[in-house]
Amino acid sequence: MSLAYDAARSDTLAARLDAELRRAHPRTVIEAALETFGDKLALVSSFGAESAVLLHIASRVDPAIPVLFLDTGMLFGQTLDYRKQLAARLGLTDVRDLRPAYQDLATTDPQNKLWRTDTDACCHIRKVLPLDRALEGFEAWVTGRKRFHGGDRLNLPVVEPSDGKVKFNPLANWTREDLEAYAAENDLPAHPLVAQGFASIGCWPCTQPVEEGEDVRAGRWKGLDKTECGIHLVRAPGAANNVGGDI
C-alpha cells in the first residue's frame, strides 16, 4: 500500500469520525477509537500537569490500551515518580517508556547541552524520533491536547489525520474548569509540580512556572518563538520519519 493511499484513507476516515464525534464525551471518543482500531491504537501521554484526566478516562474504557511515555532523559524527577504512581493507581497495564536512541544522542547531543543552542533539534532527537519509531506499529493514536491551550490548538478537531494515521483529541472541547471538575470528582492526584506554579510540564531546562494571568503553556520554551515540541506538527505527505507538547 502506497504512502499516498494511506494518507488519503486516513484523511477520509478522520473526517468521517470527526463529524460523528466532534461533540461527543471524551469516553465516547476513546470507545469509538478502540472499536475502529483495536490493538492498532495507542495513547500518548506526558504524565504532565493535566494528564491524569485522560488517563483515567482511558483506563475505564480499557486499562490495557498501550500508553506511550516519552522519557527524554531530561524530565523532572517528580514526573518520573508521578508516571509510576499514577499508572499503578489507575491500573494501566501497558505503559511503554520511549527513550532517545543512543546513536542519536552520541552523534547529535553527546554532552546533553543541545537544548541551550537548538531546542528544535533537541526535541527532535528526544521526542519526535522516539515517538515516530514507537508509532510504526499503530494506525491511530490518542492525545491530551485541548483548544483552551491556545496557539495552534485553538481550532483543534476531535479527530484529525496525521501522517497516514488517525489522531484522536478526546479533550479538545473541554475547558480548564471541566478538567478540574472531573479530577475532583474522581479524586485524581495532581502532578506534584502543579502546586509550585507549573501549568504545563515538559523537560526541566525548557519549563518554568507561569505567572498569574499567563497562558497555560507560557512556561514552555519561555522567551523563544516556539510553542510545540514537534510531534504534533503537520509534515509533508511521504516525509521521512526523521523529519519532525505537552502532549
Image: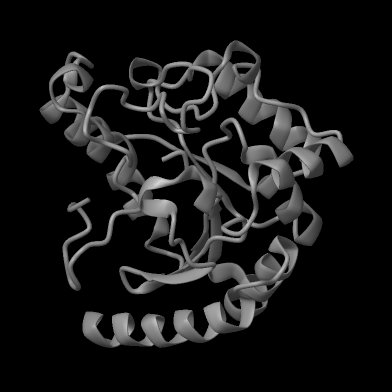
Against 13, residue 25 (above or below) is above
User: The N terminus appears in which quarter of the rendering?
Assistant: bottom left
Residue 193: x and y, percent?
59, 17
Total marks in image:
0
Residue at 18% across, 72% down: 238
Q: What is the basis of the colouring in this image?
A: one colour
Near-viewer residue (74 or 179)? 179
Question: At x 54% / y 27%, what residue is drawn?
Answer: 199
- Residue 199 drawn above or below residue 64: above
Q: Name the side, left or right, on which 179 lies relative to 45.
A: right
Res 107 visible: yes
Q: Is residue 53 above or below residue 223?
A: below
Q: Is residue 139 visible?
A: no
x, y (%) of residue 63?
Answer: 75, 53
Q: Is residue 132 above or below residue 32?
A: above
Q: Locate residue 27: give its quadrant.
A: bottom right
